Image (cartoon, rainbow, N blue to C red):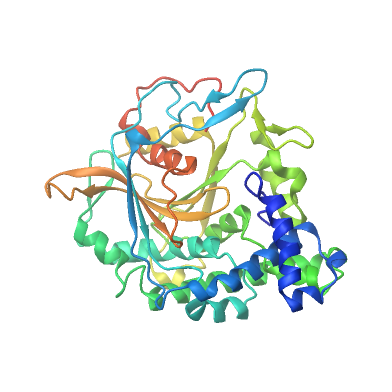
Amino acid sequence: LKPFWPKGTRKSARKAFQACIARNSTCAAMSAEHLSEEAQMALALKLSLEESQTHLGEHPQLYQEFRLPRSEASPEQVARVGGPPCVEVDIYGVEGTRPAAGALLQINTLDQFHSPTFRKSAEEFMSPNSTCGLFTMAHSIIVPKLLTQAVEDAVSTASGYLRLTRNELETLVSAKGGLRDVDVVLPELREAMRWLHESREKWIAGHAADFPWTTEHNAYLRAWVANYEISDWLCTRVLPGSAVHFVRYNQWPEHADATHEESVRIAKEERQYGGSRADGKEQISYADGDVLFWVDSSEVEKGAAATEGTCHEVKRTRSKRCASHWRAFRHDALNHSALAPMFFPVDLNGHFVFCLACELQSEEDSSAYEKSLVVFNTTSSRYLDWPSMTRTFDLAFLDSLDDGHPASSWTML
């Protein structure tokens, strides 16, 4: 699950596995021939994580914040079939269109690697050692709830964007009742862990021949969260009134590396998005009509009960959208004065975050508001420069500079 390692990390992981065998007696006692490549890499990550625990702080709260104006973000270079590398065509559908003015704001909340706080739950449910996907699943439920509590009077612009004051944002991320409060986050995180464990055990039970060894069974349970699993969670858990739009990389070019259920799901859901990778090559190329990423939306049907107690019973709809579909969706929402999309889980191709799109009060001028993609992150690292972040900002604020031109024939959404 989630086997698509960033460039160069497969070789590094193999070296890490060998190094861990030399350092760790438990690992050395295990026969490496009984572990697949993915299981070896997962074990290497686990042992490396354990070695790093001594460097953790006393408390799980993180307080780093980073800001990047959208105008300073650089487009990603992508390879095009039959031509030289091309700067990604923006999602507005008109090559060269300038994106909306605004900024990306990353707020680090809780450290997902803080063992004293989270390890007991992770061990109970045999969860992945890297839990960013699980935190993102939990945040998809927690953030809409907290936002309803934090925003006293929901004010939206003509385009449907929520306006958020600085005080409301501080309440949202507070260590007392907000995203930095373990008592708020841990219950929903444990629910995500439980759901993931049960889902994977169900797959193993139906494909027992694929898991002849206990090591393979356990490695599968502890593998990184996959995109399809986050989507499945959203389809069953998204709250009434809180449509969530998961920004996913197109993983079809990596299908050959996928195993078990992920291989089946990629073939079923992402083959249509194209892209190719030559044998033995890491470079992915895209032809006309192929897409780099897509949006997987989950929302409760209109008129569904909005009470928390009916969360599991309400009917939800799932929509898969690439460039032209997203444009049509946003135009339709504007024509009906609907609230703009706010909640975006995002696949960074090796990490997951949860984002809130809003108009945020300026720190310099309390009467001014700026289009902002607020990124809630659970590590100490900065991710604002990653391509997925820029794309998500543009998706959220698509209508700001949409000039009505049709999407180009080659739109790398």
Residue placed at 37% from the left, 39% from the top? 333
Name the one closer to the observer, 299 or 138. 138
* Horizontal and vertical percent position of residue 101: 28, 34
Task: Indicate left or right for 161 with 287 as reference.
Answer: left
The image shows residue 183 at horizontal and vertical percentages of 39, 78
Q: Which of 95 and 152 is in front in this view?
A: 95
Residue 35: where, in percent of width, then height? 82, 65
Q: Give the x, y percent position of residue 361.
A: 20, 50
Q: Is residue 249 above or below residue 47?
A: above
Residue 168: quadrant of the picture: bottom left
- Residue plotted at (42% across, 33% down): 74
Q: What residue lies at 46% left-to-right and 69% top-to-bottom?
A: 310
The quarter in which the N terminus is drawn is bottom right
- Residue visible at 43% across and 21% down in the picture: 94
The furthest residue to the top: 83
Residue 102 in sight here: yes
